[in-house]
Amino acid sequence: MAAFGKKLMYGIFKSNFRVVNSIIMIRLIQGDITRVNVDAIVNAANSSLLGGGGVDGAIHRAGGPAILEACRAIVARQGGCKTGEAVITTAGQLPARFVIHTVGPVWNGGTNGETGKLESCYANSLKLAEENGCSSVAFPNISTGVYRFPKQQAAEIAVRAVTGFMKDAKQVNTVIFVCFDSENFAFIRHELSQKGFSQDEIPG
């Protein structure tokens, strides 16, 4: 896959958001999150924080050993990361400054609090971004891979959590949804459109 395939940009002006910034930008792209140049990218990690498959493995491979070393230090201090929570590390060799690791829920039919836990992944990641001076954050499609969270529901939760947080954001002014596949891309695009976001094609 090319670094970036489909690209869309959505904007809502300050009149709709209680923020310092003049504009809040939400971008939607299909491509490789490890190549996105933002302050922080979010990793769909597992509770061990020691790497895995999918996005998790790709971030560790592209970022180099510094990310794993930082994760090991966190594990030694607190014993991993619980579902719905988030921790922050260096981004190593990635273009980003930080990696925010969050542990998404495994889908078990929707009766074990999966919705709330997934929403917490987004909210807690953005909270860490704010606390660490980040103005731009990129998210993957958390839990929609091997954790089997239904993609349509996950998209609805992701957009709701991000737009809800951004209404009161003081530091973060740009969020990028980076979708690995066209199905997740379509679901996120639909949810943004449903919320009345204006849309423009991003050139290049």
Image (cartoon, rainbow, N blue to C red):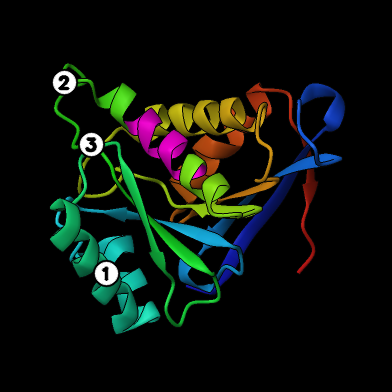
* Rendered residue at 25%/26% (across/down): 114
- Circle number at residue 57: 1
What amino acid type should be assigned to the residue bearing mark 2? Asn
Q: Are marks 2 and 1 in contact (CB under 8 Å)?
A: no
Q: Which residue is mark 2?
A: 112
- Disc 2 versus disc 1: distance between alpha carbons? 26 Å
- Specify whether 7 is left or right of 138: right
Q: CA distance from mark 1 to mark 3?
A: 18 Å
The residue segment tinted magenta is 118-126
Mark 2 vs mark 1: which is more N-terminal? 1
Disc 3 residue type (three-letter): Pro
Identity of the residue furthest to the top in this view: 111
Query: Within the image, what quadrant is residue 93 found in?
Result: bottom left
User: Where is residue 87 drawn, in percent x and y?
Assistant: 34, 52
Q: Is residue 95 above or below residue 14?
A: below
Element at label 3? loop
For this rendering, which residue is in front, 84 or 27? 84
What crowding class fits label 2: few (fewer than 14 Cα within 10 Å), some (14-19), or many (20 or more)? few
Most common SS among magenta residues: helix
Q: Nearer the viewer, residue 198 or 176?
A: 176
Q: Position of residue 109 (x, y in %)?
A: 17, 22
Query: Is any atom of residue 32 visible in this view?
Result: no
Left or right side of 132 for 171: right
- Callout 3 touching callout 2 (CB < 8 Å): yes
Which residue in the protein does label 3 denote? 105
Q: How far apart, in angstroms, are the residues tagged by discs 3 and 2?
A: 9 Å
Point out residue 4 in the picture as x, y percentages from the top left corner: 59, 67
The relative height of residue 55 versus residue 157 in the rendered view (above or below) is below
